[in-house]
Amino acid sequence: MKKLILTMMWMLAAFLTQASENVEKETGKQKEHQIENVTVEMGKSNVSLPVLDCSVTLKGKVDLGPIEAEISCTVTDPSCEKAQVTAAACLKSALRLYAGVIM
Amino acid sequence: MHNKIIQLICILLFTATCFAQESRIYIYQGKFNSSFGRGDNTRIFEGRLIVQGERSLFTMKEEGIHEHGLQGNTLNLRPDSMFTVYKDHASQTMLFEFSDFNQRSHWYADTMFPMQWQLIAEEKMIGGIPCSKAVGFFKGRGYTAWYAPSVANSDGPWKLGGLPGMILEAYDDHDDWHLTWVSTIEVQRGFDEVFFQRKINHDLQGFNGYAAYVKKMFSRLQASMAAQSNAGCVGCQTVPQLKINAWEKID
């Protein structure tokens, strides 16, 4: 009888140990799954960010003394370099045209 | 016969000298910032107010090298003389000059001393002459004038005047335009009055006519630029915008 009780206790102890290991393993899997979910969400946020344009304004002057005309060229482009080059070309072209018309 | 002609010429010259009106030239030193309210483009000027009886002529000339044409991002078309104004106190007539893009001179009439001066109880000495302070508003700008009650003339530099004494110093509220009297000289002949009398006799346009002309001039330039842009020129992907900044408010 004693042997039977000891065997039963041993089996119970073994069962409890096994059960607790399973709980830990399940919890670990859940955490891993959650982390994977977060990573996916972050990836989606990056994709939906808006593309920012660069806006460049360059100014020139026609100086008549008591009257000064301000010429401004504003260019917006995804590339800042392209915006600057285009604005500079616009202003140069405008000043040359004015000089050509006037002088 | 030859001697008689020489005698006649001598008599005419003598008579002309006797009747020639003496002129007094008030010389001012000062500055003007043509980028007023937007930046600093200050240059040094000498102003001259030539008083000849009841008439006067004022003009300002830039000192140093006067650069002209396209320099960097500035197309410099400033005339040699600016703020040129002719006044005839007897007929209360004022004419002012505007130099266009082609340096062509246009004359317009304006009201003589419309500014309402407020006399301030402050005094200071300018070149040893006691002066009193006055403040006023004219064509969109506030001005301070220091006038000399001992100089019995209500004139002053540019269009300013109408005070009980000659204006010896004047400046706007932002100190973009500032002139101070430095000396006076006397000459036999200051300027040709006939030229201005002829102008007065013509039907000159007033300040509104001047404002309309300036607007028209710049709108033509804007239209030229837009036309070039529409024609698809390189570097014209965007139409440049033109904004007029006038010392005297024109709208």
Image (spheres, coloured by chain):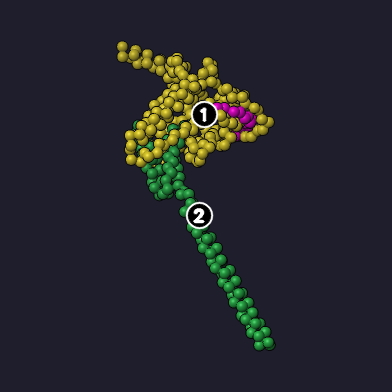
Question: Is residue A17 left or right of A41 when viewed as pictured?
Answer: right
The image quadrant of residue A20 is bottom right
Determine crowd level at label 2: few under 14, some 14-19, many 20+ residues with C-alpha closer than 10 A.
Answer: few
Q: Can residue B24 be seen in this view?
A: no
Residue A85 image offset from top left, x and y in percent: 38, 46
Residue B141 sits above or below residue A90 on the image: above
Task: Tally the numbered discs.
Answer: 2
Q: Which chain carries label 1?
A: B
Residue corresponding to mark 2? A45
> As shown in the figure, which amino acid type bears the numbered disc 2?
Ser
Res B248 label: 1
Q: In the image, are marks 1 and 2 on the same chain?
A: no
Task: Please identify which colour was used for chain A in the image.
Answer: green
Q: Is residue B128 magenta?
A: yes
Determine crowd level at label 1: few under 14, some 14-19, many 20+ residues with C-alpha closer than 10 A.
Answer: some
Residue A83 sits above or below residue B62 on the image: below
Question: Is residue B131 left or right of B42 when viewed as pictured?
Answer: right
The single residue placed furthest to the front in the displayed view is A1
The single residue placed furthest to the left in the displayed view is B1
Which of these two is toward me, B101 or A80? Answer: A80
Which of these two is toward me, A26 or B73? Answer: A26
> As shown in the figure, which amino acid type bears the numbered disc 1?
Glu
Q: Can residue B203 be seen in this view?
A: yes
What residue is shown at x 41% (from left), y 34% (from top)?
B77
Question: Is residue A42 left or right of B76 when viewed as pictured?
Answer: right
Which of these two is toward me, A8 or B37? Answer: A8
Task: Please identify which colour was used for chain B in the image.
Answer: yellow
Q: What stretch is highlighted in magenta?
A: B126-139
